[in-house]
Image (tube, helix red, strand yellow):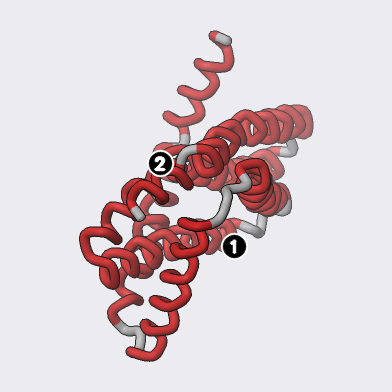
Amino acid sequence: MFNLKSGFIKHFKNNLFIYFLVTVILMIGISAGVITIKILSESQRGELHSFISNFFSNIDSQKIDNVSLLKYSIFNNLKTTLVIWILGLIILGVPITLGIVLFRGFTIGFTIGFMINDFGFKGLMLALLTLIPQNIFIIPGIIIISSSSISYSINFIKRRKKNKKESLFKETFGFSFFILITCLCFIIGGIVEAYITPYLMKIIL
C-alpha cells in the first residue's frame, strides 16, 4: 500500500503539466456547453424543454431500477476508459483523448446550463443534487485516466528513441495497472448515480 501511494504521488508530480492541460480542456468543454445554450433557436429550446419535462414526469411516477442504472453507468464509463487506454497504447491517440475530455465537459456544461436557463432555481437545485454527486468521482477519474494515457504516449516515444525495451514493458504494465485502479472512481460514481441521485431528483421534483 505504501509503494502504491508513493507511486501515485510520484506520478502526479511528474505529470503536473499534463493534468493541468487536461483539466483546462475539460473546463473549456464545460464553458462551451453552457455558451451553446444561448445560441439555440426557440424551437430547439422548446423541444429540449418538452423532452426533459417528460423525462422528469416519468422519473417521478415510475419505479427506479437501481441495478440497471448501476450497470449502465459503470459500463458507459468503462467503455470510455477502454477507448482512452487503447488510444494511449497506439501513441497517436493524444488528440482524440483530448477530444473525448472536451466532449465530456461539453455534455456536463450543456446539461447544467440548460437546466438553470429553463428551470431557474429548480434547475439549479437539480443540477447540484443530480449531476454533481456522481461527477465528484467520475470527473477526477476521467482526468486521471486521460492524463495517464497522454503521459504514457509521451514516455513511449522517449523510450523508443533510447531503445529501452525492458523499461517500456514496465511502463506499459504500470500504465495498465494505474488505469485499472482508477476505475474504482467510476464504480463509486456509478453507485452514487444509481442509488442516491434518483432519490435526490425525486425530492427536488
The image quadrant that residue 109 belongs to is bottom left
* Mark before the other along the chain sequence, 2 or 1: 1
Foreground of the two, 179 or 93:
179
The structure residue drawn at horizontal position 31% and vertical position 84%, both measured from the top left corner, is 39
* Secondary structure category for the residue under label 1: helix
For mark 2, what is the residue? Answer: 133
The structure residue drawn at horizontal position 64% and vertical position 52%, both measured from the top left corner, is 76
The amino acid pointed to by label 1 is Ile
The amino acid pointed to by label 2 is Pro
How far is the residue under mark 2 from the one under mark 1?
27 Å
Where is 116 relative to 170, above or below? below
Percent across and percent down for residue 52 are 44, 70
Percent across and percent down for residue 193 are 51, 43
The structure residue drawn at horizontal position 41% and vertical position 57%, both measured from the top left corner, is 25
Would residue 199 be visible to someone looking at this image?
yes
Image quadrant in which the C terminus is located: bottom left
* Secondary structure category for the residue under label 2: helix
Percent across and percent down for residue 145 are 56, 42
The structure residue drawn at horizontal position 23% and vertical position 65%, both measured from the top left corner, is 120
Where is 43 relative to 2, above or below? below
Would residue 156 be visible to someone looking at this image?
no
Foreground of the two, 22 or 43:
43
Percent across and percent down for residue 129 are 35, 46
Q: Badge 2: how crowded within 10 Å, few (<14), some, or many (20+)? A: some
Query: Mark number for residue 96?
Result: 1
